[in-house]
Amino acid sequence: MTPEFAIALGRQAIETVLMLAAPLLLAGLAVGLMVSIFQAATQINEQTMTFIPKIVAVFVTLLICAPWMIRTLLTFTKNIFGNIPNVGG
């Protein structure tokens, strides 16, 4: 395995992880921001009010994005298995 191949493989793995995590993190961020603005406007500081909407938003986003996430992960895995002959050392 050449250093270039290892770096390309690592870069592809990191890109895949970021692509898969981005929708969930963005949904949590958006809902958290809306809840924070609501809490600041009403001066309600209930801790459960921040967690429950975020969890629901992340689960809904996961349900919506799950097929795409699975296809992306399968493509990455097929690519890894397809490159096994190139790893020989």
Image (cartoon, rainbow, N blue to C red):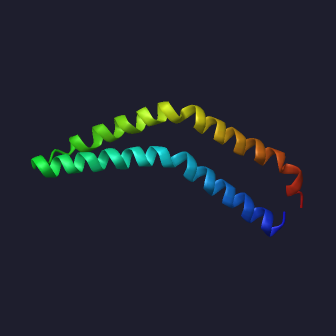
Quadrant hosting residue 69: top right
- Whole-percent x, y for residue 4 in the image: 79, 67
- Whole-percent x, y for residue 24 in the image: 45, 44
Looking at the image, residue 42 lies above or below residue 88 = above
Residue at x 51% of width, y 48% of height: 21
Quadrant hosting residue 14: bottom right
Looking at the image, residue 12 lies above or below residue 71 = below
Image quarter (top left, top right, bottom left or bottom right) of the N terminus: bottom right
Residue at x 77% of width, y 46% of height: 79
Left or right: 84, with 30 as reference point? right
Please name whichever residue, 30 or 74, is drawn nearer the observer in this view of the structure. 30
Left or right: 69, with 46 as reference point? right
Residue at x 29% of width, y 42% of height: 51
Please name whichever residue, 60 or 87, is drawn nearer the observer in this view of the structure. 60
Image quarter (top left, top right, bottom left or bottom right) of the C terminus: bottom right
Quadrant hosting residue 78: top right
Q: Residue furthest left?
A: 43
Q: Residue furthest bottom?
A: 3
Residue at x 74% of width, y 61% of height: 8
- Whole-percent x, y for residue 5 in the image: 79, 62
- Whole-percent x, y for residue 40 in the image: 15, 52
Left or right: 33, with 62 as reference point? left
Looking at the image, residue 89 lies above or below residue 16 = below
Q: How many marks?
A: 0
Left or right: 62, with 57 as reference point? right
